[in-house]
């Protein structure tokens, strides 16, 4: 209970738990929060837990679509999504990396066509390995290593 | 097997079975490529030949292929004066070409350009080289050449020589040869070794390539010696370049201990890698290899547009 109090309990909304420590802000960036909503968002970083440190994100009055959140598995493979209604967890979902990552990671190859400003395309990667994550550019077939650094 | 409407972007999009099918079809195309036979199976079809960077050999062989099958070619051979220079996106240029033609061939300096073109075109797109990336028709013509000369690709001792680090063609060729289970030896100066990813791909397919800088030793058991150009700009100074290039020259002296039926291939243009004295030997296959670009491209143009011999 003590740990949970580090960020306020929420009545309704979503809690993203077990985020790789240090990556909470990037998770928000991937989810387009706060740009896409005016909900109250609280972030806790380096929270101690049984299995080491973690980050937590709470979004009030908004139920995140678990499938939409799956893409954060890219940088937070152990994350879980909890949907809260009236202070109770009503749904729990472990993130699962989708087979394709579109518009989230910038290709590491400067001459890749997906990095060309004037082309009407989003970056696109195929997930070739899930643990540890390995992705391959659909356009140039490069495999960027520092994925977390390349979040758009 | 049905290739109608299919894009040809990367050799990795094809299974061994599909590659075999293309090679077989190209074999049937040879008399048509030589002009000994004629059938206008692409009559009424228009090819857009979009060369955003010049490549005489590839462009001419595509144009010859289209003409030999009775089709017509529109397009440009370098981007100066095109709307791309004025800031048009590749996507828009492709949309335009798509509305004017039935097949699109694209050569572009940026990696992934052909894949992008494929997304914006209804017509099949053939990649004629995208930046340091892929060049599948070159790869297919290389496989076709080895198959024609050796009757098979697997189990041949194949030496890839030269700039294996930056060379456009050698990476996909190494992949494709490993797919067939050829024995691979990579010979290069230490600074231009085959990238790790390519070696890993080979290993994953059960082929353990040998890496060496000793050409003389590698040539002894070779069935195929595939040479590539070493570019001056890869070296810090001219002296170092001359020293390295000098140690990898293929001449009659080097070939003294080679197998009688060793074939020497090169994507051309060559500079000093192969001494002209080798041209007259039965080992020299690079000019025939260049010719093979026509039957393989005729086969591809015909397959993607649904034509049949
Ligand atoms: Zn890329």
Image (cartoon, coloured by chain):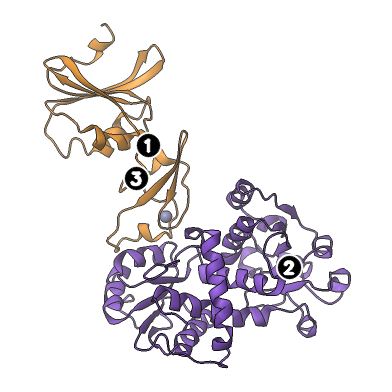
Chain colours: A orange, B purple
User: Disc number at residue A74?
Assistant: 1
Residue A22 image-quadrant placement: top left
Q: Name the residue under label 2.
A: B224
Question: Can the viewer see residue B138 in this picture?
Answer: no
* Label located before the other in sequence (3 or 1): 1
Spatial separation of the CA atoms under disc 3 and disc 1: 9 Å
Is A24 placed above or below A7 here?
Answer: below
In the rendered structure, the answer to whether residue B90 lies left or right of residue B309 reads: left
Where disc 3 sits, the SS reads strand
Q: Is residue B174 left or right of residue B51?
A: right
Q: In which quarter of the image is the C terminus of chain A?
A: top left
Relative to the observer, which residue lies in front, B185 or B192? B185
Report the residue marked by disc 3.
A101
Residue depicted at x 51% and y 67%: B136
Q: Where residue B106 sits in the image (x, y, percent)?
A: 41, 74
Expressed as whole percent of the image width and height from the top left, the position of residue B232 reads: 64, 69
């Amino acid at each position: 209970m003590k740990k949970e109090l580090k960020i306020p309990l929420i009545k309704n909304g979503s809690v993203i738990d077990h985020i790789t420590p240090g990556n909470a802000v990037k998770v928000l960036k991937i989810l387009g929060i706060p740009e896409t909503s005016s909900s109250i968002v609280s972030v806790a970083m380096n929270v101690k837990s049984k299995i080491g440190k973690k980050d937590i994100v709470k979004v009030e009055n908004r139920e995140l679509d678990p499938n939409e959140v799956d893409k954060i598995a890219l940088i937070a493979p152990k994350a879980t999504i909890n949907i809260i209604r009236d202070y109770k967890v009503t749904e729990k979902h472990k993130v699962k990396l989708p087979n394709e990552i579109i518009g989230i990671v910038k290709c590491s190859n400067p001459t890749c066509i997906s990095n060309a400003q004037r082309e009407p395309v989003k970056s696109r990667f195929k997930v070739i390995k899930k643990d540890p994550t390995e992705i391959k550019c659909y356009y140039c077939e490069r495999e960027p290593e520092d994925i977390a650094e390349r979040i758009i | 097997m049905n290739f109608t409407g299919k894009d040809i972007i990367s050799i990795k999009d094809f299974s061994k079975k599909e590659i075999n099918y293309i090679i077989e079809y190209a074999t049937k195309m040879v008399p048509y490529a030589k002009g000994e036979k004629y059938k206008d199976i692409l009559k009424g079809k228009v090819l857009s030949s979009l060369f955003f960077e010049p490549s005489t050999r590839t462009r001419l062989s595509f144009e010859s292929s289209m003409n030999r099958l009775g089709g017509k070619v529109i397009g440009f051979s370098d981007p100066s004066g095109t709307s791309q220079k004025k800031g048009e996106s590749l996507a828009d240029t492709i949309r335009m070409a798509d509305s004017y033609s039935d097949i699109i061939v694209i050569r572009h300096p940026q990696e992934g350009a052909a894949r992008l073109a494929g997304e914006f075109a209804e017509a099949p797109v053939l990649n004629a080289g995208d930046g340091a990336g892929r060049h599948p028709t070159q790869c297919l013509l290389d496989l076709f050449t080895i198959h024609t000369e050796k009757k098979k690709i697997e189990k041949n001792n194949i030496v890839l020589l030269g700039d294996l680090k930056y060379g456009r063609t050698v990476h996909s060729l190494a992949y494709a040869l490993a797919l067939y289970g050829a024995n691979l030896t990579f010979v290069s100066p230490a600074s231009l070794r085959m990238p790790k990813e390519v070696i890993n791909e080979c290993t994953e397919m059960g082929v353990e390539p040998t890496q060496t800088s000793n050409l003389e030793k590698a040539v002894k058991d070779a069935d195929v010696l595939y040479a590539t150009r070493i570019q001056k700009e890869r070296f810090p100074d001219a002296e170092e370049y001359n020293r390295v290039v000098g140690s990898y020259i293929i001449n009659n002296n080097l070939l003294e201990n080679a197998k009688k039926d060793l074939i020497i291939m090169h994507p051309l243009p060559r500079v000093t890698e192969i001494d002209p004295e080798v041209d007259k030997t039965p080992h020299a296959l690079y000019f025939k290899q260049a010719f093979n670009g026509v039957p393989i491209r005729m086969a591809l143009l015909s397959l993607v547009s649904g034509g049949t011999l």
